[in-house]
Every structure is written in structure tokens, then in C-alpha cells.
Amino acid sequence: MSGLRSLKKHKTRLAIQDAALELFAEQGFENTTVEQIAAHAEVSTATFFRYFRSKGDAVFGGESDDRVELLPALARAIVERPHYEDDLTAIRRAVLSAWVPLLDPLRLRRHFLAAATSPLLVGLSTNLTVKWQTTIGEALANRRGLAAPDHKCRIAAAMALAIVTETATAWVHNDIQGDLAEALDQGYELMSRLCAELYEARLTTAPPVDDPNRR
């Protein structure tokens, strides 16, 4: 019975969240009321507030949201990647193996579209991004045996998350076609090529070895 109650609660939570995301994407965050969300989800307003404290929580979910629960799984996947992989490769493989398979593409698309309808939601999205970036940086530090993330960990986490955010945004707006996992993999591959091009450009433009300014 406990399992059935938990399943029912989970389904109700998702129904409310889906209703909110759909309405936000259609008519904007500010123009949508809690009463409208509850009616669209076929629940009472009181039921809405049992699951979410505010309209913003209906987008980003609060601490019990599936996206937040994905953080520990992603962190574990990063730490468990082979030590011969560089940081960006470890994050890339962890994202594709531990994050992408658990996503609902339709809900992700609605989430991105809804988040763009309000300055408040943009701010909440930024806060969530910082939390993800911090978690990734800490996982990289753990993987390298550091007590805390160093500058390299933080830079790698920022770069990796920027690739996810930009690629997912392009995918949501149909600038990239096809499967999200494939799009993200291509995004990371593009970053690898850009880094390689930068390295080659530095070699090409480097001063001669006997240049006194290089000593």
C-alpha cells in the first residue's frame, strides 16, 4: 500500500508540473494562476500547495524534484569514470549515461520554453545551474582526490554545463534535429574540435624558439 501511495503521489506531482509547464509555455508565467494550473491538472488548489510552494517550484520542482535527485547520480557517474579520461570526457560520458536516459524529452522542452517566459524563472534557472555546476566541480575534485574543487575543476564544470545548456536550448528550439543524446554528444565533440583548433592556432602563431622574447 505504501508503494501504491508513493506512485500515486508521484503521478499527481508530475500531472501538476506538466499542467504548469504547458500553461506557462502557452500564456506566460505571470499570466498563469495557481487556480488555472490546478484546474488544468484536475486537482484542487489545496492539492497544488501540498506539492509545490509556488508557481516557480512547479517549474524547478524544489528539493524533491527528479532533476535535483539526478544530481547525486550524475556525481557518482563522474567519479566512477576511468581515471585515464580527462575531465571533460568523464563529464561527457557521465551525462550521456546517467542523466540523458532519465529525461522526458517533452517535459524538458516545456521546461525550457516556460523558463524563458519570465525574468523570475530565468533567475531561478540560473540558481539551479549554479547548483549543478557546483556538484559537477565537486565530483571532479573527488575523482582527482582533492579535498575541494580547484580552478581546473571549476573551469571544466562550467564548460561542460555550458555545452549542455546551449545544446539543449538549440534542440528545444529545433535548431538541432534528432535525438537529444546524439545532439549533446555532438555538442561535446564540437567543443573538442574547438579546443584542438585553438591549440593548433597557438602552435602556428608561436614565435620561433630562438626568439629572445620567448625566453
Image (cartoon, grey):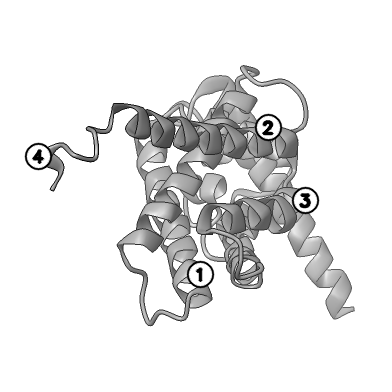
Give the residue displayed 57% in from the left and 39% down from the top.
35
Closest to the camera, between mark 3 and mark 1, is 1
Q: Which residue is mark 4?
A: 213
- In the rendered structure, which disc, 3 or 2, sits on the residue that comes first in sequence? 3
Q: Residues within 10 Å of mark 1 (few under 14, many from 20)?
A: many
- In the rendered structure, which disc, 3 or 1, sits on the residue that comes first in sequence? 3
- In the rendered structure, which disc, 2 or 4, sits on the residue that comes first in sequence? 2
Give yes or no for contact between labels 3 and 1 (Cβ–Cβ under 8 Å): no
In this rendering, the answer to whether 146 lies above or below 123 is below
What is the CA distance from the residue labelled 3 to the residue labelled 1? 20 Å
What is the CA distance from the residue labelled 3 to the residue labelled 4? 52 Å
- For the residue labelled by badge 1, is the local secondary structure a helix, a strand or a loop? helix
| Amino acid type, callout 2 | Ala
Would you say residue 75 is visible in this rendering? yes
- For the residue labelled by badge 4, is the local secondary structure a helix, a strand or a loop? helix
Q: Is residue 115 left or right of residue 184?
A: left
Q: Which residue is mark 3?
A: 101
What is the CA distance from the residue labelled 3 to the residue labelled 2? 13 Å
Q: Which residue is mark 1?
A: 139
| Amino acid type, callout 4 | Asn
- Residue 43 in the image: state x and y as whole percent: 71, 48
- Residue 18 in the image: state x and y as whole percent: 68, 40
Q: Which residue is mark 2?
A: 183
Where residue 107 sits, quadrant-wise, is: top right
In this rendering, the answer to whether 78 lies above or below 159 is below
Closest to the camera, between mark 3 and mark 4, is 4
- Residue 82 in the image: state x and y as whole percent: 66, 69
- In the rendered structure, which disc, 2 or 1, sits on the residue that comes first in sequence? 1
What is the CA distance from the residue labelled 2 to the residue labelled 1? 24 Å
Q: Is residue 118 left or right of residue 102?
A: left
| Amino acid type, callout 3 | Pro
